């Protein structure tokens, strides 16, 4: 599926490093992710090749755009859609329905694994597509030795809790634990007045 969207929105800055949204039910998504094989995690290198800071991660990508042609971007379903969408789509719709205006577009959705002993170096997400939407993180697994830094402050993100990350501030992640840390991430661009009829991923 290809969705080409003309996205015309204001830059998004939530004024705080991290916004706690609330608890969400991740049981179905945890089970679906738990059934993934190593080949599923390694089959899509889009994120690692596009963004140098993510070279030490693995991803299962459901929906993706590289932002080319912004704001007239192409959003495509990737291999992870068939693996995880049954569990992930209801979760995304729940979060959007409770915390954001409806009728926008999900332009990226993925599970990201930061391997044991690896880091995501400090960076700011630069492309306009990252600044136009809300970046939502839902931790699936973590450990006490994962440190998420935003704007120079450490945060401990909890499993089963949804957060909005301010990706316009410098952020990094370090995993000193023995196991990989898995987070479900999606980018949601809300509608403008001109876009109220634009449908998101369904």
Image: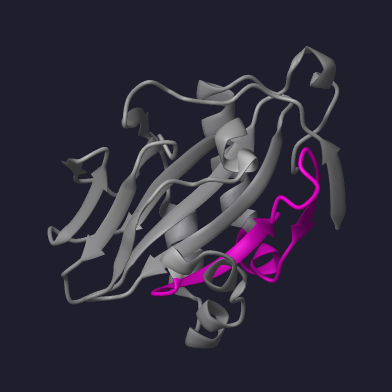
Magenta stretch encompasses residue 38:
no
Residue 10 position, x and y percent, is: 64, 21
Q: Magenta segment range?
A: 55-84
Along the horizontal axis of the image, is 198 left or right of 122? right
Residue extending farthest to the left is 144
Along the horizontal axis of the image, is 121 left or right of 145? right
Quadrant assignment, res 45? bottom right
Against 24, residue 97 (above or below) is above
Against 29, residue 35 (above or below) is below
Residue extending farthest to the bottom is 39
- Which residue is pictured at 33% across the width and 47% down the height? 171
Magenta stretch encompasses residue 63:
yes
Quadrant assignment, res 22? top left
Name the quarter where the N terminus is drawn: bottom right
Residue 37 at least partly seen? yes
- Which residue is pictured at 60% across the width and 82% down the height? 43
Residues 122 and 117: in front is: 122
Residues 123 and 54: in front is: 123
Along the horizontal axis of the image, is 139 left or right of 31? left
Name the quarter where the C terminus is drawn: top right
- Which residue is pictured at 35% across the width and 51% down the height? 139
Residue 35 position, x and y percent, is: 49, 75
């Amino acid at each position: 599926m290809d969705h080409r969207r003309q996205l015309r929105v204001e830059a998004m800055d939530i004024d705080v490093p991290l916004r706690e949204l609330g608890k969400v039910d991740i049981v179905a998504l945890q089970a679906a992710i738990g059934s993934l094989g190593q080949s599923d995690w390694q089959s899509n290198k889009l994120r690692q090749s596009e963004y140098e800071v993510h070279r030490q991660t693995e991803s299962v990508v459901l929906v993706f755009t590289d932002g080319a042609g912004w704001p007239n971007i192409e959003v495509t379903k990737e291999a992870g859609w068939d693996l995880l969408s049954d569990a992930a789509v209801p979760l995304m719709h729940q979060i959007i329905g409770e915390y954001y205006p409806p009728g926008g577009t999900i332009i990226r959705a993925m599970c990201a694994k930061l391997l044991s002993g690896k880091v995501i170096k400090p960076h700011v997400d630069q492309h306009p597509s990252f600044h136009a939407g809300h970046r939502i993180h839902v931790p699936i697994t973590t450990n006490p030795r994962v440190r998420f830094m935003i704007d120079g402050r450490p945060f401990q993100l909890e499993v089963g809790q949804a957060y909005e990350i301010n990706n316009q501030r410098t952020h990094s992640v370090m995993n000193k634990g023995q196991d990989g840390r898995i987070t479900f991430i999606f980018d949601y661009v809300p509608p403008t007045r001109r876009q109220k009829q634009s449908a998101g991923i369904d």
